[in-house]
Amino acid sequence: MALDNPLLTELAQAYGIATEFWDWKGRLSQVPAETVIAVLKALDVDASSDESARAALDAHRLRPWTLMLPRCVVTIAGRPATVAVHVGGGQPVSVHVRLEDGGSRPLRQLQDDEPDRWVGDRWTGRATFEIPTDLPTGYHWLAAESSDASAETALIVTPAFLGFPEAMGARRAWGYATQLYSVRGQDSWGMGDLQDLADLATWSATQQFASYILVNPLHASEPMPPLEPSPYLPTSRRYVNPLYIRPEAIPEFARLDEFDRKAIRRLRRRLKAAVDDTDTIDRNAIWKAKIEALRIIYAKGLKPARRMSLDDFIRREGPVLSQFATWCVLAREFGMNWREWPEQFRRTRSPEVADFAGTHADEISFFIWLQWVADTQLSAAQATAKDAGMRIGIMNDLAVGVSGNSAEVWTLGDVFARGVSVGAPADHYNQLGQDWGQSPWRPDRLDDLAYGPFRQMVSGILRHSGGIRVDHILGLFRLWWIPEGNEAHEGTYVHYNHEAMVGILALEAQRAGALVVGEDLGTVEPGAREYLASRGLLGTSVAWFERGHDGRPLAPEAWREYCMASVTTHDMPPTAGYLAMEHVQLQHELGLLTEQLGTEIAFARAEQGQWLTLLRERGLLAADDTDVESIVLAMHRFLLATPSRVLVAALTDAVGERKTQNQPGTVNEYPNWRVPLHGSDGRRLWLEDVYDDARALRLAGVMNGFQQPPTLPRS
């Protein structure tokens, strides 16, 4: 027991709130009572006194008996499951399944000896029914009927095992990981966009024989400057950031008259003159220019068939799309933080919001149009990737959460917890912990809504992709909640129904024929990785993190088959920079180290020494070879010696980049998520430069298992 108060401990356990946890050094850490009480408050549970805590615990225990059927039932295909039905004492009840395809199946009642209880103003009994094990996967309904009541609830039957998509076949797949905004083509608007993605996929497939491109989250950002640079702190995960639109690729651009086309070319020319020679990506300047161009194209209107396509998109998305677009317009009117708007506009369905939508209908339609255009260009990128021969195509990244100021929180209201943010406790690479500034889902409200918001988000991302990488997939098991006013390490874990969320993720991927990769790095809840593997979801293995019980690099044959294996990740420097220990020096300069600089450098040298020894022992690196590119290639050869079925190479490693994209624990102290792609000589690269990069050709030779990589002159 972590708390002195057993009542508070029991209440915390009832709501899945940890009162103790094992930290990264293997120590059992206790969670203060104040933190537990603050987290309970975020779930609308008053635990400020023993009396209120006891009342909350009693209400929690009684809640299932107040419902005829649970809010949601999630099962695994082929496995036994039951459902409890609560009816008036002594009343007969029948239950059947209404299948997604229109069929119906009765449920068999089982013996249930639970005595009746007095609930409200009557005696209530419980009956238990068996859910058939041969139900198809899908979204079904349970219906219960008794003499005086009836009810329905969602029944979600999820795949027992997802595995690899049919398109992958029996062969191993490899691909590139890149931050799309950093890879700009000569015709782009100051940063990489969806047309650049299609072009990068074509090169990767036809010249490099890669099977996929893994990109950063493309989620929607703010509708006006200042734009949040982190793709992992979006305003909506359901919609795409229109910053990635290529205006000239919109079909209506071809229908513009010469005056309008000259105006757009002038906007792009002025933007390029302002940003092309800068060493950081200026999203604010890019969006100011691009949105002007997009408004010109929008004003042209649509031909009938294109109008039909837009109307169908609006119909499929439902009211959430118009709510998101309304938020965009309201944000431009009142500022980005909706919690500081006039009171009448803080509720999505208020009469004042409806009136505002009516008087700003065309502007709202513009933001709806932007989402449709972004959706069609993302679809085109995936089609291009598949047509070029990629077995998987585009793999999208799903951020773990959204900002508390975001459209998603405004739209979904109490589905998100208030007064807390999401982060991570301290670990070796972030020794002060992390506060990501994101609002977490409320586990109880997700269950109340049959996981509808989660389902819609996942299905939307998978609509135009062959795979999904789920950032911090361990967040489907538990998330680190930090109460407002606390430091990042002063939080606690809150548990989620991982069987439901992992199951729905697998179901949506099964329907899309997609691959699912979970980023399961950092502090891992016991059994989480094993559970993901048992459901056929891939984990993530990064060479620098994979170590055995002896603390040495893990032998390749001991790696997991069901994982995406890589040398580095976006939260670390590219391998060339890591070998130069630039990350240690940067953390020292930013005050992020808890140990002395000399101690950390010694640790890094020892770590690299272990790796070099292993690479040489395995015959992957010559004994006297200390060339940086040779080591990078050797570490990627190491990946091929593992049983991992999916391998990934960072595009930054392919071209010899040294600069890191993100330094965890910082915001503006380092230009996170604003670093354009550079070559080994420190020169900024265009996408067209990548096509001819000899280092990339050599790395692709390694990833394809060529015995003799191309011997072109070194770049």
Image (cartoon, grey):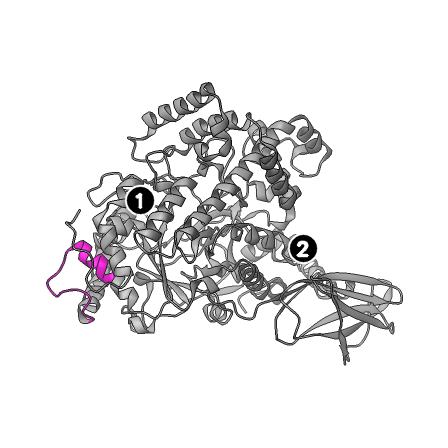
**Which span of residues is magenta-colored?**
618-635
Q: Is residue 130 above or below residue 624?
A: below
Question: From the image, which quarter does the N terminus lie in?
Answer: bottom right
Q: In this view, does 371 lie above or below 132?
A: above
- Residue type at tag 1: Leu
Is 414 on the left-hand or right-hand side of 3? right
**Toward which corner of the image does residue 444 lie, by quadrant?**
bottom right
**Toward which corner of the image does residue 302 lie, by quadrant?**
top right
Which residue is drawn at the image coordinates 55% and 55% (left, top)?
Answer: 34
Q: Residue placed farthest to the top in the image?
A: 259
Q: Is mark 2 on a helix, strand or loop?
A: loop
Residue 89 is situated, as x and y percent measured from the top left of the image, at 86, 72
Give the camera-side residue of 278 and 254. Answer: 254
Mark 2 highlights which residue?
A: 449
Is 612 on the left-hand or right-hand side of 429? left
Say if the magenta span includes residue 619.
yes
* Circle 1 residues within 10 Å: few <14, some 14–19, many ≥20: some
Say if the magenta span includes residue 413.
no
Residue 79 is situated, as x and y percent measured from the top left of the image, at 62, 75
Which residue is drawn at the image coordinates 56% and 57% (left, top)?
Answer: 36
Q: What element carries label 1?
A: loop
Mark 1 highlights which residue?
A: 590
Is residue 492 visible in the rendered image? The answer is yes
- Contact, mark 1 vs mark 2 (Cβ under 8 Å): no
Residue 521 is situated, as x and y percent measured from the top left of the image, at 40, 61
Q: Residue placed farthest to the left in the image?
A: 624
For the residues labelled 1 and 2, the Cα–Cα distance comes to: 43 Å
* Circle 2 residues within 10 Å: few <14, some 14–19, many ≥20: some
Q: Residue placed farthest to the right in the image?
A: 147
Is residue 570 visible in the rendered image? The answer is no
Give the camera-side residue of 361 and 711. Answer: 711
